């Protein structure tokens, strides 16, 4: 009698748990299991804006070049490039938006520093956007918001990081909240234009795109894919709008590493936050790398240019923290791999056997470990008793 009750209990609660967390359960199984710890530093917002970026970029490149993994690969910092910002003077004089593009004339030293870093294998460039805002939305808000008007007056020297957060999104009209979507033809035109300009400046079609503030939709993805983009960096979900309070909303997900979207676009997940100027330390970030390795996942760090601009003290502290992290990673993992996001995406897409484990036992073990990371599922497993059989299976497959 007791055994029948137990069996019924496990069947019923098991079905409830599966239904409850089905997306996470399936995604955890489908996501490739990496054989080695992979570390990538993803850095956004470089390009348009202050010229002091050139010296910061050179210093970062110099520091990265002092490290290598066991295959002699250098650590790669991906640079999410912003191609333009507002030309404040012309925009205000004419009353209509004028763009200031980066070029050899305005940002010669920066472009040179980026190029030599790419050649040295420590940088990989990615498209972040034409502007780090949607120009018509910026224009609308500047008419009623004094701070935004002051920002526009100081452009192109002003930093987009100083704009109100909703305005920093490119693929929505956040001039009013909740935000409104852009029309499909507008998106198609803007995406094509930014890919073309990127290609003119850097001589390559961007392989990887990073949506500003991680707000974008299917139309943006399709337009990028049609223009030649193959990979999109995500935070593990796709936010499509801003709500009435300006917060990212309309989440679609979960998204996992190596998942393919429409038009075979490959997604990566970047969710380790390493902003030393906001207090993130090397040792915390190393713990995150260790956790990712346990889960068979790459660690994609998110670190913005603001950590390396401004006071010399802030920049030095950020560089020192990054250096310490790399040192800890190299010291603790002989099999650590430094990759670019581009290379990682191709490995995941092709399930390259050298990098991706297909052995059933290891996949099962990592899958159970990943399920333990789904907070509600873990709690339910404890409450229902499922933790016992699943935990036993986890031990047996270790
Ligand atoms: Zn950004």
Image (cartoon, helix red, strand yellow):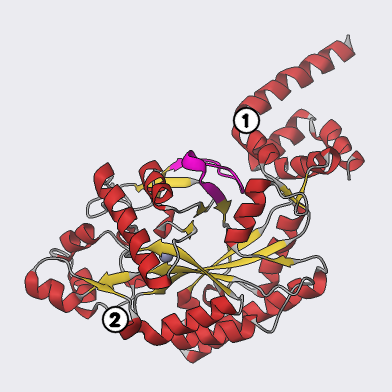
Q: Nearer the viewer, mark 1 or mark 2?
A: 2
Q: Determine which quarter of the picture holds residue 385.
A: top right
Q: Nearer the viewer, residue 376 or 44?
A: 44
Q: Is residue 328 above or below residue 394?
A: below
Q: Is residue 208 left or right of residue 147?
A: right
- The residue stretch that appears in magenta: 251-267
**As displayed, is residue 253 above or below residue 122?**
above
The answer for how far apart the CA atoms under marks 1 and 2 are is 48 Å
User: Residue 59's x, y, as percent?
Assistant: 55, 87
Residues at marks 1 and 2 touching, judged by CB atoms closer than 8 Å: no
Q: From this view, report whether residue 22 is shown above or below residue 94.
A: above
Number of callouts in the render? 2
Dot 2 falls on a residue whose secondary structure is loop
Quarter assignment of residue 376:
top right
Q: Residue furthest right?
A: 396
Residue 344 image point, x, y percent: 64, 57
Q: Give the class, few, some or many, for how many residues have Cα within 10 Å of label 2's Cα (few <14, many ≥20).
A: some
Does the beta carbon of the residue at mark 1 sit less than 8 Å from ligand 1? no
Which sits earlier in the primary sequence, circle 1 or circle 2? 1
Q: Quadrant of the N terminus?
A: top right
**Looking at the image, which residue is at 65% across and 49% down?**
348
Residue position marked by numbered label 1 in the rendering: 22
Residue 44 within the magenta-colored segment of the rendering: no
Residue 165 visible in the current orientation: no
Quickly name the residue at label 2.
Answer: 157
């Amino acid at each position: 009698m007791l055994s029948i009750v137990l069996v019924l209990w496990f069947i019923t609660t098991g079905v409830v748990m599966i239904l409850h967390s089905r997306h996470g359960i399936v995604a955890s199984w489908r996501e490739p299991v990496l054989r080695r710890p992979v570390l990538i530093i993803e850095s956004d917002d470089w390009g348009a804006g202050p010229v002091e970026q050139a010296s910061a970029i050179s210093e970062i490149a110099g520091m990265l070049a002092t490290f290598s993994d066991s295959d002699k690969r250098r650590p790669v910092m991906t640079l999410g490039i912003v191609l333009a910002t507002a030309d404040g003077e012309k925009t205000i004089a004419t009353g209509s938006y004028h763009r200031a593009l980066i070029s050899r004339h305005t940002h010669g030293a920066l472009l040179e520093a980026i190029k030599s870093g790419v050649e040295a294998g420590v940088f990989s460039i990615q498209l972040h956007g034409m502007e780090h805002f949607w120009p018509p939305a910026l224009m609308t808000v500047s008419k009623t918001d004094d701070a935004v008007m002051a920002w526009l007056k100081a452009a192109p020297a002003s930093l987009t990081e100083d704009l109100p957060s909703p305005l920093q999104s490119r693929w929505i009209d956040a001039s009013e909240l909740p935000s409104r979507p852009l029309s499909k033809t507008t998106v198609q035109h803007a995406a094509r234009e930014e890919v073309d300009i990127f290609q003119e400046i850097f001589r390559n079609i961007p392989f990887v795109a990073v949506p500003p503030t991680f707000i974008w939709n299917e139309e943006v993805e399709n337009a990028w894919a049609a223009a030649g983009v193959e990979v999109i960096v995500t935070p593990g979900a796709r936010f499509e709008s801003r709500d009435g309070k300006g917060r990212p909303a309309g989440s679609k997900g979960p998204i996992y590493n190596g998942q393919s979207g429409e038009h075979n676009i490959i997604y990566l997940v970047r969710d380790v936050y390493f902003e030393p100027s906001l207090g993130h330390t090397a040792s915390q970030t190393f713990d995150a790398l260790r956790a990712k390795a346990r889960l068979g996942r790459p660690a994609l760090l998110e670190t913005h240019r603001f950590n390396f601009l401004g006071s010399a003290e802030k920049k030095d502290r950020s560089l020192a923290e990054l250096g310490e992290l790399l040192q800890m990673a190299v010291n603790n993992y002989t099999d650590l791999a430094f990759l670019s996001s581009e290379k990682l995406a191709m490995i995941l897409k092709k399930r390259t056997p050298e990098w991706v484990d297909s052995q059933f036992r290891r996949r099962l073990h990592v899958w159970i470990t990943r399920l333990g990371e789904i907070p509600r599922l873990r709690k339910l497993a404890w409450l229902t008793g499922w933790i016992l059989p699943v935990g036993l299976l986890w031990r047996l497959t270790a």
